[in-house]
């Protein structure tokens, strides 16, 4: 489930970014995060949650605890990733692809 949702997320993000870059004045880069992108991201999170819970359940950890812990971790990590995507899209809108320079490491 997570892998297929990841592929859908990739395709949706690429298509949205391509249409945004063709017409930058029409909408903001942060508007790319629409329902279609969120729905595929949610599928990734559900797949990760099931994977984590199953991994914990293998070690004889109770089902309720395994899923409770996995849901909590998945919500926290998923929220941080979604926030980071928003930040990257804002940087992309502000300065283009040169604003996202991953090779520079300033301390």
Image (spheres, helix red, strand yellow):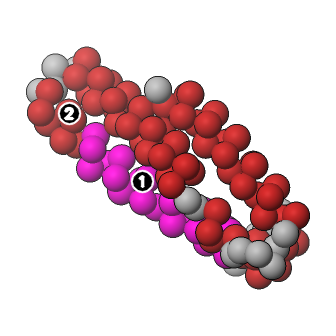
Question: How many marks on residues?
Answer: 2
Is residue 71 covered in magenta?
yes
As displayed, is residue 74 above or below residue 2? below
Q: What's the magenta region?
A: 70-90
Front residue (pair 88, 101): 88
Q: Is residue 69 visible?
A: yes
Residue occupying image coordinates x 68% and y 50%: 13
* Tag shown at residue 66: 2
Q: Point out residue 7 in the picture as x, y percentages from the top left corner.
A: 63, 33
Kindly identify which residue carries mark 1. 77
**Does any portion of residue 99 appear in the rendered image?**
no
Describe the element under mark 1 as helix, strand or loop.
Answer: helix
Name of the residue lying farthest toward the bottom:
94
Judge left or right: residue 41 versus residue 20: left
Q: Is residue 104 above or below residue 42?
A: below
> Which secondary structure class fits the magenta region best?
helix
> Which of 27/46 is in front?
27
Q: Quadrant of the C terminus?
A: bottom right
Mark pair 2, 1: CA separation: 16 Å
Indicate whether 75 appears above or below 60.
Answer: below
């Amino acid at each position: 489930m997570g892998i297929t949702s990841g592929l859908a997320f990739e395709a949706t993000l690429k298509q949205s970014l391509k249409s945004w870059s063709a017409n930058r004045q029409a909408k903001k880069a942060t508007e790319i995060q629409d329902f279609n992108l969120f729905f595929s991201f949610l599928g990734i999170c559900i797949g990760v949650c099931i994977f984590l819970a199953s991994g914990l359940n293998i070690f004889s950890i109770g089902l309720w605890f395994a899923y409770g812990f996995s849901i909590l971790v998945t919500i926290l990590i998923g929220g941080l990733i979604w926030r980071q995507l928003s930040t990257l899209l804002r940087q992309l809108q502000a300065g283009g692809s040169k604003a996202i320079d991953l090779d520079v490491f300033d301390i």
